Image (spheres, rainbow, N blue to C red):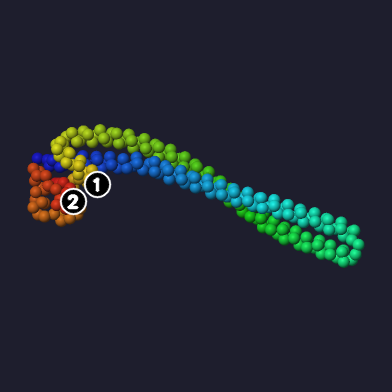
Amino acid sequence: MAHPLEALLVLQGKDRKISRLQREIRDIPVRKAEVETQLEHAKTKLAAAREAQMKVESDLKQLEIEVEAHREKIIRYKQQQMEAKTNDQYRALLHEVAAEEKNISELEDSEIELMEQLDVSKKAISEREAELKEEEDGIREEQEMLMERLAEVQEDLEELKTERERTASNCEGSLVKKYERLYANKRDFAVVRVENSHCKGCNMRLPPQVVNDSLNPAKLVVCNYCGRMLVNL
Ligand SMILES: [Zn+2]
């Protein structure tokens, strides 16, 4: 006679597939959220690059205003020079003009540095934009794939559940109940094989009597250690 647990092994095979599909269905929204976070990250990086560029641009404008102010001072000093009454006055103004020119030259050095920074930040922005574009394309594709997969898995799951019920109806009712409780509790296997006198569920060596009993289809034998049903085919 066929071992009664043989049918349970088939049922367990289906239950394991169902568990796998259910896990996948649970994981898809998680993966979707991860992908969306990735996209947000790329957007944040681009926004930061744009902000950095705006800061450099505003610093540059500020510098230009300062340079202009110094230039106006020079014009004023030069006018005053023409109206100078004494040599001392004239020399003092000459000195002021030189100081202003030095200021301008320093500001212009900073301006050059800022313009170099601007080039760097422009390049960074176009890189970030390309990155975002790539990210968006990839994400759209992945989202579509995930949704397709989800529909597929859900369909498979429904089919499998029907099949599973059919298989369960071919097994003895009280045995199925026992098996279901055990499977829910163990989450991996409720029925395991005996191999070389070892339980394949927990890998413990079984007492000879238990191994012997497991060969008898009329007996329902469980592992002394993990409590899983033992089948010795
Ligand atoms: Zn065991």
Q: Residue at x 20, y 41 (%)?
A: 180
Q: Position of residue 71 (x, y in %)?
A: 79, 55
What kind of element bears circle 1?
loop
Mark number for residue 188?
Answer: 1
Whether tag 2 and tag 1 are in contact, CB under 8 A, the answer is no
The mark closer to the camera, 2 or 1, is 2
Asked if residue 75 is positioned above or below residue 42 in the image, the reply reads below
Nearest to N terminus: mark 2 or mark 1: 1
Q: Please, what is the three-letter code of the amino acid marked with disc 1?
A: Asp
Q: Quadrant of residue 168?
A: top left
Q: Quadrant of residue 15?
A: top left
Residue 204 appears left or right of 96: left
Which is nearer the eye, 77 or 165? 77
Q: Residue at x 40, y 44 (%)?
A: 31
Q: Residue at x 42, y 42 (%)?
A: 32
Label 2 CB-ligand 1 distance < 8 A: yes
Q: Please, what is the three-letter code of the amino acid marked with disc 2?
A: Cys
Mark number for residue 67?
Answer: none
Q: Which residue is mark 2?
A: 226
* Position of the N terminus by quadrant: top left
Q: Position of residue 179 (x, y in %)?
A: 18, 42
Residue 117 appears left or right of 198: right
Q: Residue at x 23, y 47 (%)?
A: 186
